[in-house]
Image (tube, helix red, strand yellow):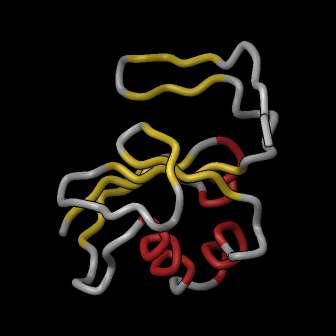
Amino acid sequence: MKIQLRFFASVRESLERSEETVELPEQVKTVGDVRQWLIARGDVWAEVLGEGRSLRMAYNQQMTNADTLIADGAEVAFFSSGDRRLSTWTLGRLRFQVLSVEIHS
């Protein structure tokens, strides 16, 4: 299965890339599996995406959790949940700017 990975804010800066197209092994079925597969690359990948990190994930431009099943051609994105630098980002020809954020528990 082939998917598009996108990285935003401090995750993008640490990995020194904003996107990557990857062919996943057959056993990778969920967003959480993608994260674990990337962590297994080691070095900076394990540091930036490791389980102890506060990380947000999106699946096809929708916020999601680790249990979300993925499909061929999907987009999976990662960014730090506490990163204040996530105020502006670009996706294709679209530019997004966060004007305010409310967190409810």
Q: Quadrant of the C terminus?
A: top right
* Vertical arrangement, residue 63 with respect to residue 5, above or below: above
23 horizontally vs 31: left or right:
left
Nearest the eye: 89 or 104: 104
Q: Quadrant of the N terminus?
A: bottom left
Seen from this angle, which residue lies furthest front?
105
* Vertical arrangement, residue 85 with respect to residue 83, above or below: above
Q: Residue at x 49, y 71 (%)?
A: 32
**How many numbered marks, from 0 up?**
0
Q: Position of residue 80 (x, y in %)?
A: 71, 50
53 horizontally vs 76: left or right:
right
38 horizontally vs 20: left or right:
right
* Vertical arrangement, residue 75 with respect to residue 94, above or below: below
Q: Residue at x 49, y 75 (%)?
A: 38
42 horizontally vs 105: left or right:
left
Nearest the eye: 82 or 93: 82
Q: Position of residue 4 (x, y in %)?
A: 32, 53
Q: Residue at x 67, y 19 (%)?
A: 98
Q: Residue at x 78, y 74 (%)?
A: 52
* Vertical arrangement, residue 95 with respect to residue 73, above or below: above
Q: Position of residue 68 (x, y in %)?
A: 40, 61
